[in-house]
Image (tube, helix red, strand yellow):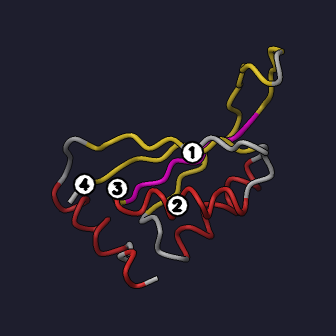
């Protein structure tokens, strides 16, 4: 089984919490953490922008990333929301097993 951490930036803690609640309730992620007060600086439409955002951190299985991405895009206020999956290369076997037990397989959608 392959596991990932998915990063999603949002316009506010409330938006990040809403998205996190949905993907956990739908068993697309085992866990959602919201970190507020993220200072972001980025290129958008040919200009450098700065914003205060929230960071949503999701723990899930690699096979669910496409479904998680689609769900985030449906719920997000941004035209191009950040959804970046980073592989988990190791960890507490009990925690990784918990991710399995807490998420649904794509076939059960």
Q: Which residue is mark 4?
A: 2
Where, by quadrant of the figure, is residue 82 drawn? top right
Measured from the top left, where is residue 17 in percent x and y? 67, 58
Measured from the top left, where is residue 63 in percent x and y? 35, 61
The secondary structure type at the circle numbered 4 is loop
Instruction: Confirm or deny contact between disc 2 and disc 1 (CB under 8 A).
Output: yes
Q: Crowding at label 2, few (<14), some or many (≥20) Cα neighbours within 10 Å? A: many
Q: Which residue is mark 3?
A: 62
Image mark for residue 28: none
Distance of label 2 from label 4 (alpha carbons): 15 Å
Whichever of labels 3 and 4 marks the residue nearer the N terminus, that label is 4
Distance of label 3 from label 2 (alpha carbons): 10 Å
Whichever of labels 2 and 4 marks the residue nearer the N terminus, that label is 4
Image mark for residue 68: 2
Distance of label 3 from label 4 (alpha carbons): 5 Å
Distance of label 1 from label 4 (alpha carbons): 18 Å
Residue at left 48%, top 58%? 66
Q: Which residue is mark 1?
A: 83
Q: Would residue 65 be counted in the magenta stretch?
A: no
Residue at left 56%, top 67%? 23
Distance of label 2 from label 1 (alpha carbons): 9 Å
Task: Write the start and end of the magenta stretch as one range.
Answer: 53-60
Whichever of labels 1 and 3 marks the residue nearer the N terminus, that label is 3
Q: Is residue 97 above or below residue 81?
A: below
Measured from the top left, where is residue 45 in percent x and y? 83, 23
The secondary structure type at the circle numbered 1 is loop
Distance of label 1 from label 3 (alpha carbons): 13 Å
């Amino acid at each position: 089984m392959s596991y990932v951490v998915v990063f999603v930036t949002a316009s506010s803690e409330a938006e990040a919490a809403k998205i996190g609640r949905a993907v956990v309730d739908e068993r697309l992620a085992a866990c959602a953490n919201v970190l507020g007060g993220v200072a972001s600086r980025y290129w958008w439409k040919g200009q450098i922008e700065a914003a205060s955002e929230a960071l949503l951190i999701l723990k899930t299985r690699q096979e669910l990333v496409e479904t998680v991405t689609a769900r985030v895009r449906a719920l997000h206020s941004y035209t191009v929301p950040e959804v970046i999956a980073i592989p988990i290369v190791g960890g507490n076997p009990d925690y990784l097993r918990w991710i399995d037990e807490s998420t649904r397989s794509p076939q059960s959608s």
